[in-house]
């Protein structure tokens, strides 16, 4: 194995990480091809009837494809952060995590997709009727977005059943303001840059980068709470 040091070592490490992020993001998109196709078609529709035509199959595919693939991506980046044995591999761990967490991911996906649909319908209803309610639902949308991201982290980090994982995610989302800000801010900035500045990031870095930064923030929050729980409550003299 060749040793790299100095400038060349730094460039090699950067290129290696870019490759890992890019390949993982491409795997994620590959497993979400039908959803990507529907989303691309949504960009060109003009009538509400046409939007509904694409939204129905999209809502059905989200739990079966998007959530298992995204969970697998989070599991892969968790391996990078925690430096597990298979952290240097990419596709095999991705496929293994996809299969291992498929049932839990579909369960999470059914619940979260339903909540997102209810949120979207309510927001659409109040859009031209009540500005205050629109603001309320935008705030709720931010909470739901961070909850969804945190649910992926909880799913890959804890071995919990479906309902406890949802409860745990809920309490983490509302009870950890720094984690909430970190996930919302990082994800928002990456999505804005990807859609408005550097669109080439979408197929190569957007998803995996959000997963990496979100799980990094989640894991730091986890370590902080673990240290607090392990710290002695009193000192004996």
Image: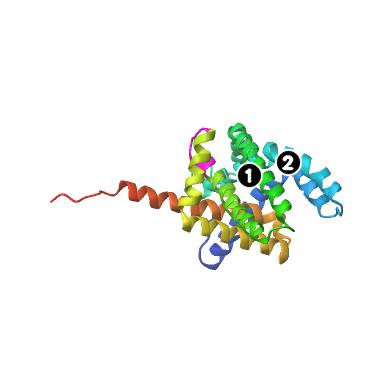
- Identify the residue at image location x=56%, y=48%: 147
Q: Nearer the viewer, residue 162 or 72?
A: 162
Relative height, residue 69 to residue 179 (above, below):
above
Magenta part of the chain: 154-161
Residue 150 % position (x, y): 54, 48
Secondary structure beneath dot 1 equals helix
Q: Nearer the viewer, residue 201 or 47?
A: 47
Instruction: Say which mark, if any, is on residue 70.
Output: 1
* Residue 156 within the magenta-colored segment of the rendering: yes
Asked which quadrant contains residue 194, the reply is: bottom right
- Identify the residue at image location x=37%, y=47%: 226
Residue 5 % position (x, y): 51, 63
Left or right? Give the position of 205 relative to 237: right
Residue at the extreme front of the image, as rendered:
129
Residue 91 % position (x, y): 64, 42
Q: Nearer the viewer, residue 237 or 147?
A: 147
Circle 1 packing at 10 Å, graded few (<14), some (14-19), many (20+), is: many
Left or right? Give the position of 84 relative to 184: left
Circle 2 sits on which residue? 59
Residue 229 % position (x, y): 33, 47
Secondary structure beneath dot 2 equals helix
- Which of disc 2 and disc 1 is earlier in sequence? 2
Q: What's the coloring here?
A: rainbow
Circle 2 packing at 10 Å, graded few (<14), some (14-19), many (20+), is: some
Q: Is residue 16 visible?
A: no
Left or right? Give the position of 122 relative to 100: right
Relative height, residue 24 to residue 104 (above, below):
below
Relative height, residue 183 to residue 165 (above, below):
below
Q: Nearer the viewer, residue 112 or 161?
A: 112
Residue at the extreme left of the image, as rendered:
237
Q: Is residue 70 visible?
A: yes
Left or right? Give the position of 56 relative to 140: right
């Amino acid at each position: 194995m060749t040793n790299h040091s100095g400038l060349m070592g730094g460039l090699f490490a950067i290129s290696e990480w870019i490759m890992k992020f890019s390949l993982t993001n491409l795997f994620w998109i590959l497993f979400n091809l039908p959803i990507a196709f529907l989303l691309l078609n949504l960009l060109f529709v003009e009538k509400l009837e046409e939007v509904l035509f694409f939204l129905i199959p999209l809502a059905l595919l989200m739990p079966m494809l998007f959530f298992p693939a995204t969970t697998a991506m989070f599991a892969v980046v968790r391996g990078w952060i925690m430096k597990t044995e298979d952290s240097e591999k990419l596709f095999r761990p991705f496929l293994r995590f996809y299969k291992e967490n498929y049932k839990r991911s579909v369960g999470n996906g059914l619940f979260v997709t339903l909540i997102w649909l209810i949120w979207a319908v309510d927001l659409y209803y109040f859009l031209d009727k009540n500005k205050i309610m629109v603001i309320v639902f935008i705030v709720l949308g931010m909470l739901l977005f961070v909850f969804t991201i945190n649910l992926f982290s909880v799913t890959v980090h804890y071995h919990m059943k479906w309902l406890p994982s949802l409860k745990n995610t809920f309490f983490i989302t509302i009870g950890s303001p720094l984690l909430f800000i970190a996930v919302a801010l990082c994800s928002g900035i990456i999505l804005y840059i990807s859609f408005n500045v550097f669109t080439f990031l979408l197929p190569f870095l957007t998803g995996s980068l959000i997963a990496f930064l979100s799980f990094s923030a989640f894991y730091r929050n986890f370590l902080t709470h673990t240290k607090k729980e392990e710290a002695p409550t009193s000192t004996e003299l």
